[in-house]
């Protein structure tokens, strides 16, 4: 009789939220690395959640928000998990509960620091000042220092031979190197046959060179924005600036260089 009261069908067991999440992950056959890639929650935070040590997370809103996302990834009732976490944290403030219920976690490293916020504001002021100077010189010639550059002079076509010269990026060769820009960035590199080349949580500043003999190398990660990429020492565009999961994306030198080139005109 007591067993039926402790665990009724369709209800979560009476142990902690962290243990419930861990059991659901193991039942689904998922590793912590896979959950980290799916949810974009760093593995170290997932380990803290499974231990039930929610106070070790950066804030209560992170504890509740991360747990909701974890529950969703393993097909648990995220509202019930969030309620359990709030009880374990002893959250009493209605305002904090409301804020946490609408919180959708990303990576804490994505939250800009105070220094970055000041830098962004300063850069915006510079852009505004530069735009004002441009319009002042265009509409009020001679109002500022320096020679006036007339619009017709700006439209002078470049020499024909310059247009036909190949760009340095188009002819670049050499190793493909990925450098992590954030800590705990999970990534998997593999070839066209699915053979793993490397899989780990990379630390900030850590680099990985794609083997030159890898056949059709590809990448899988939940943080494409967190990698600087070079081909032969030259920087190429990131695979994405969005907070999204990418998979089976070709990363050979040819594929990466092609991403940075304009599409050829038809005809």
Image: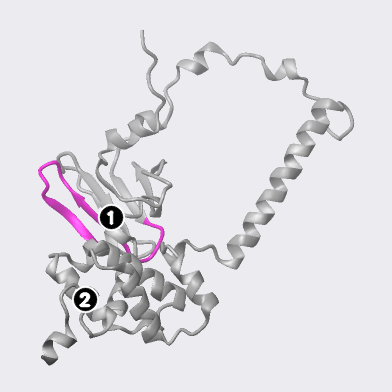
* Corner quadrant of residue 6: bottom left
Say above or below: 252 vs 10.
Answer: above
Residue topped by disc 1 = 208
> What residue is rendered at 60% in x and 67% in y?
114
Report the Cα–Cα distance between label 1 and label 2: 45 Å
What is the x, y in percent for residue 112?
54, 62
The answer to whether one can see residue 201 in this image is no
> In the rendered image of this protein, does residue 23 appear above or below residue 208?
below
| Residue at screen point 50% across, 63% down | 111
What colour scheme has been applied to the protein in the rendered image? one colour
Q: Which residues are magenta?
A: 180-200
Q: Residue furthest right?
A: 143
- 11 to 117, vertically: above or below: below
Count of residue discs = 2
Q: 47 and 234: which one is in front?
A: 47
Q: Relative to the observer, which residue lies in front, 198 or 68?
A: 68
Question: Contact (CB < 8 A) between labels 1 and 2?
Answer: no
Q: Residues within 10 Å of mark 1 (few under 14, many from 20)?
A: some
Q: Nearer the viewer, residue 201 or 229?
A: 201
Provide the secondary structure element on which disc 2 rests: loop
Q: Quadrant of the C terminus?
A: top left
Q: Position of residue 264 (x, y in %)?
A: 37, 18
* Residue 188 magenta: yes
Residue at the spot 29% in from the left edge and 40% down from the top edge: 174
Q: Residue 236, position in %: x, y? A: 40, 40
Q: Sort mark 2 into few (<14), some (14-19) or many (20+) by Cα contacts within 10 Å.
A: few
Labels 1 and 2: the sequence-earlier one = 2
Residue located 27% across and 41% down the image: 251
Whether residue 228 is visible here, answered yes or no, is: yes
Numbered badge on residue 11: 2
């Amino acid at each position: 009789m007591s067993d039926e009261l402790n665990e009724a069908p369709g209800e979560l067991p009476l142990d902690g939220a962290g243990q419930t999440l861990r059991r659901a992950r193991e039942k689904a056959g998922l590793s912590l690395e896979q959950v980290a890639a799916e949810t974009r929650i760093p593995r170290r935070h997932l380990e803290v959640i499974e231990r039930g040590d929610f106070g070790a997370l950066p804030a209560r809103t992170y504890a509740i928000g991360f747990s909701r996302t974890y529950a969703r990834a393993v097909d648990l009732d995220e509202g019930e998990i969030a309620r359990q976490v709030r009880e374990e944290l002893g959250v009493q403030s209605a305002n904090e509960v409301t804020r946490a219920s609408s919180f959708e976690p990303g990576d804490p490293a994505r939250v800009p620091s105070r220094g970055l916020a000041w830098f962004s504001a300063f850069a915006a002021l510079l852009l505004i000042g530069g735009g004002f100077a441009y319009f002042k010189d265009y509409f009020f010639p001679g109002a500022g220092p320096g020679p006036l550059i007339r619009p017709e002079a700006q439209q002078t076509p470049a020499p024909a031979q310059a247009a036909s010269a190949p760009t340095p990026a188009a002819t670049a060769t050499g190793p493909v190197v990925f450098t992590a820009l954030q800590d705990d960035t999970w990534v998997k590199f593999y070839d066209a046959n699915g053979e793993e080349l490397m899989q780990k949580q990379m630390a900030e500043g850590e680099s990985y060179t794609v083997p030159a003999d890898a056949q059709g190398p590809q990448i899988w990660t939940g943080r494409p924005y967190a990698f600087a990429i070079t081909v032969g020492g030259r920087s190429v565009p990131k695979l994405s600036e969005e907070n999204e999961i990418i998979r089976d994306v070709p990363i050979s030198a040819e594929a990466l260089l092609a991403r940075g080139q304009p599409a050829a005109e038809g005809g």
